[in-house]
Image (cartoon, rainbow, N blue to C red):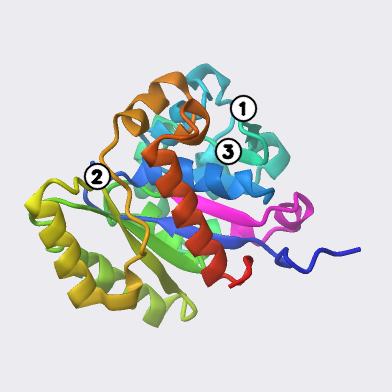
Amino acid sequence: MSDPQRPASPKIIAIANQKGGVGKTTTTINLGAALAETGLKVLIIDIDPQGNASTGLGIEPEMRNYTSYDLILDDIALSDLVHETATRNLSLVPANVDLSSADIELYSNEKRSFLLRDALRRPDLLEHGYDFVLIDCPPSLNLLTINAMVAAHSVLVPLQSEFFALEGLSQLMLTIREVRQSANPDLRIEGIVLTMYDARNNLSQQVEADARANLGDLVFAAIIPRNVRVSEAPSYALPVLEYDSMSKGAQAYRALAAEVLKKNQLLAA
């Protein structure tokens, strides 16, 4: 019998911000783990050439025989690309430095913006029964990020609670609008999540106030605090939810996951 709580096909969310160091990969890993903790099947696709999501989930470079490069540019079966992680219900398509040259190769392909979308429309993705696919984008608005936005149903934006945080957001919003107009009219903003938040810091409070004043309901109620456990977890190749389940960081990502589920009607209101 089908489960009415499960979507017929996976919800695909690109986690993107062209600024580096905003907690993008940390959010991808821990949102994925928090969703998986509820019993949903989650696939993370790492398309950042740095491969930090892959390392942070324990997939060492020598284990990455096939990567997201092969997903985007070659016709490799998903079963050959996916690694199971130590976290139950959480799988990963890893990345490595091969992706650094992908932009050059993509430019010569007339379908350059649609390759990831086409790869994720293959029947074998549905056969795996994923509920969510989270795409960890590189810290730039390059063709890899455009591919993610064309493939995705929505974009989730981590926003660091620091000076100039809102400044770079306008370019990202413009890119989302352009993708919506040219290639993916159904693309939506899943939401903006404040990261590295220090409640004792007036600047963090000001960034939050400005974000909520300018962006309203697009800003998630859940806020990710600056938390040492969140910072330590990747060095143990674990999400913070497993590294320290009761830490403030773990609780914040559970709250974020609950909002995402509620927004997608996978959790009772």
Left or right: 74, with 176 as reference point: right
Residue drawn at 52 percent across, 35 percent down: 94
Picture residue at 8% right of the left edge, 53% below the top: 203
Q: CA distance from mark 3 to mark 2?
A: 25 Å
Mark sitting on residue 235: none
Check disc 2 and give the amino acid type.
Answer: Met
State the SS at label 1: loop
Residue at the far top: name it. 62
Residue that numbered label 2 is attached to: 196
Callout 3: few (<14), some (14-19), or many (20+) C-alpha neighbours within 10 Å? many
What's the amino acid at mark 1? Answer: Ala
Front-lying residue, 238 or 205: 205
Judged by depth in the image, the label closer to the viewer, 3 or 1, is 1
Residue 92 shows which numbered tag? 3
Q: Secondary structure at mark 3?
A: strand
Q: Which residues are magenta?
A: 118-136
Quadrant in which residue 100 is drawn: top left
At 14% from the left and 57% from the top, the residue drawn is: 205
Residue 195: percent from left, percent from top? 28, 49
Of badges 1 and 2, the one in the foreground is 2
Q: Nearer the viewer, residue 223 or 59?
A: 223
Q: Quadrant of residue 93?
A: top right
Q: Which residue is mark 1?
A: 86
Instruction: Identify the image quadrant of residue 191.
Output: bottom left
